[in-house]
Amino acid sequence: MSAFISGPRVRVPATASGPLDGLRFAVKDLIDVAGVTTGGGNPDWRASHVAARCHAPCVDALLAAGATLDGKTITDELAYSLEGANHHDGTPLNPRWPHALPGGSSSGSASAVAGGEVDFALGTDTGGSVRVPAAFCGLWGMRPSHDAISLEGVLPFAPCFDTVGWFARSIDVLAAVGDVLLPEAASAASSSGQPFRLVRVAEAFAARARNEPDDALRLDTLAESLGADTAVDLFATDAARWLACYQAVQDLEIDISLGDWIRSTRPRFGPSIAARFAQLERLDRGQATQWRATQRELRSRLDAMFEPDTVLVMPTTPNALLPKDAPGAAIGRFYEDALTMNSIAAIGGLPQITLPFTDAIDRPLALSIIGARGSDRALLALARALYSQHTLANLQ
């Protein structure tokens, strides 16, 4: 299945020469490209909107840095999924593990990069929509700090969590894109010059162990080999509260962004997506608003935990893959664990990078590193150093 939206391939030449000269990129169909209607993965959204008058600023920046736009990619409907299956447009291929889902909602962007169609691709990440596909497709993936990259020209889903992220097959390209898109910022490393202190998120490793004990052991050993020799119980036995907070605030934001359009248009959604949006009609807005106070409390707790040199390390996903024929119960468990793990960066507005690893059984193994808000550039430098360390160790 193609990674790209139907119709002629959208192509836009670079507008200047720069650090991304010669690189081709694709854009998730939630991000505006001038002259093209942003479809959002849903035919009724596409039919009820007009072509974008201008590029989203993130697209403009990449074109001005020398990159060429080479396609708009399939997204799960209006971003409300982590699976990568679209009822209307189909399911993009997971090129390396074709029996499995590519992960969503930036499924087409991940597929296009993993399949070598483009050098890098933009996606969006709210509750894991870059992080999960990066892990499932064996890619590098970057979710930046919230508000680090403008959301202008991006179809809103849950704006207080939404970010523009990207995929690449190498850390060099991932970092080069970051150099173009990210604001300049001081390093998050301590002023004393000491190296980052890597700390494992114990509950995330435990979630992987419940599903895939062997993988959890491999990932734990890998994290320790990279220097994450201590662990923290970040959720403090209150993981359900983190998940409930994320979901309640997300639904409130979705209702503000999309609720009026859904109620007036009554769009055709695929069955699983329709059920998710139907939850908006049962939304207790007063209670959901109270969850915003909880969000601020949890965010303050995270801020206090991040000393200048602290970086969290955890499995990116609670499962290595989701098979295309995964039963509903397995998908439900995946969502509960994945959204809980992903709520850390979402609630904290924190940058998170997926580092791809594989082992002898040829399945994706991905670790994530999470840094303090605004530490995006330093986190990219750390990702490069950690991957080099792992590569050198394997050559010895």
Image (cartoon, rainbow, N blue to C red):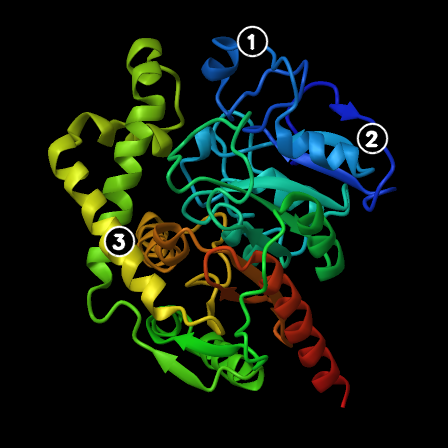
Question: Hey, what amino acid is under mark 3?
Answer: Leu
Question: Hey, what amino acid is under mark 1?
Answer: Val
Viewport quadrant of the C terminus: bottom right
Label 1 Cα crowd, 10 Å radius (few <14 / some 14-19 / many 20+): few
Residue 388: mark in rendering: none
Residue 243: mark in rendering: 3
Front residue of 249 and 87: 249
Label 3 Cα crowd, 10 Å radius (few <14 / some 14-19 / many 20+): many
Residue 277 to residue 315: above or below: above
Residue 121 to residue 259: above or below: below
Q: Residue at x 57, y 20 (%)?
A: 38
Front residue of 155 and 86: 155
- Per the image, the residue denoted by label 2 is 14
Give coordinates of residue 228: x percent, y percent: 49, 82
Label 3's element?
helix
Between marks 2 and 3 in the image, the one whose residue lies nearer the viewer: 2
Q: Residue furthest front?
A: 191
Label 1's element?
loop
Q: Along the horizontal axis of the image, is 210 left or right of 393?
A: left
- Per the image, the residue denoted by label 1 is 50
In the rendered image, which quarter is residue 377 located in? Answer: bottom right
Give coordinates of residue 246: x percent, y percent: 29, 48
Residue 384 to residue 391: above or below: above
Whether tag 2 and tag 3 are in contact, CB under 8 A, the answer is no
Q: Along the horizontal axis of the image, is 8 left or right of 43?
A: right
Question: Hey, what amino acid is under mark 2?
Answer: Ala
Viewport quadrant of the N terminus: top right
Per the model, the C-alpha gap separating discs 1 and 2 is 24 Å
Label 2's element?
loop
Label 2 Cα crowd, 10 Å radius (few <14 / some 14-19 / many 20+): many
Per the model, the C-alpha gap separating discs 1 and 3 is 36 Å
Asked whether residue 362 appears in the rendered view, the answer is: no
